[in-house]
Image (cartoon, helix red, strand yellow):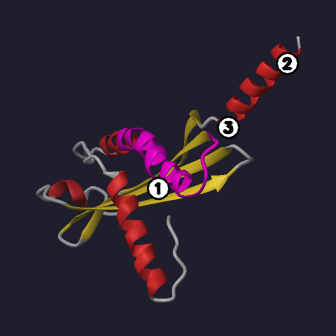
Amino acid sequence: MADENSTEAAAGDQQQGQQQFAMQRIYLKDLSFEAPMGVEAFKKQWKPQVNQELNTKTNRVDDDNYEVVLTLTITAKIDEETAFLTEIQQAGLFLVKGIEGQQLAQVLNTMCPQILFPYAREAVDNIVTKGSFPPLMLPPINFDALFAQAMAQAKANAGDGEQPTVN
């Protein structure tokens, strides 16, 4: 009997020390679309200059849950005039347990945005098409490379006396 209790306690301790990562929910937090040129955009030859801005933000909800928000801002210009502008905040709630420090930062800044990006890309394509513009298929993004670049920048800034920060 005493052996069973100690075995169960040891198994419980192992489970508490295990790393867990799970997506709890994915949701659209905000979406906007503007076509400031109106009908004039459709009278011009469609060879836009497309600019894409990307940002991620993390909010700790409780001990083991984090909200990660991927923000994409897409601007399409024709002859220096904005044909359309769309911004999306694709969010997710993620369970992250037993992961700390640098590994936690990497999970929140690479794995979570990689999960959110296809949803954001689909929503952008959908809203642009509903705005009567040609489909906009955003290229894949290497979040691991972006994170490595941000960490290298933070390290370089720390050498300059600035505090390192990672988006």
Amino acid carrying mark 2 in the image: Asn
Q: Secondary structure at mark 3?
A: helix
Amino acid carrying mark 1 in the image: Thr
Q: In front: mark 1 or mark 3?
A: 3
Left or right placement of residue 26 versus residue 110 in this view: right
User: Depth check: 92 or 20 in front?
Assistant: 20
Q: Which residue is mark 1?
A: 71
Left or right placement of residue 117 versus residue 48 in this view: right
User: Depth check: 112 or 77 in front?
Assistant: 112
Q: Quadrant of the N terminus?
A: top right
On screen, residue 81 above or below 146:
below
Query: Where residue 34 appears, x then y in whole percent?
Result: 40, 57
Q: Which mark is residue 17?
A: 3
View extreme (bottom): residue: 161
Q: CA distance from mark 1 to mark 3?
A: 33 Å
Q: Is residue 35 magenta?
A: no
Tell me the quarter of the picture where residue 81 sits: bottom left
Query: Neighbour class for label 2 at 10 Å: few (<14), some, many (≥20)?
Result: few
Q: Which residue is mark 2?
A: 5
Query: Where residue 72 appears, x then y in whole percent?
Result: 41, 55
- CB atoms of marks 1 and 3 within 8 Å: no
Tell me the quarter of the picture where residue 40 sits: bottom left
Query: Where residue 23 appears, x then y in whole percent?
Result: 56, 34
Query: Neighbour class for label 3 at 10 Å: few (<14), some, many (≥20)?
Result: few
Amino acid carrying mark 3 in the image: Gly
Q: Earlier in the sequence, mark 2 or mark 1?
A: 2
Query: Where residue 105 appears, x then y in whole percent?
Result: 53, 56
The magenta span reads: 96-122
User: Depth check: 42 or 14 in front?
Assistant: 14
At 11% from the left edge and 57% from the top edge, which residue is drawn?
A: 45
Q: Earlier in the sequence, mark 2 or mark 3?
A: 2
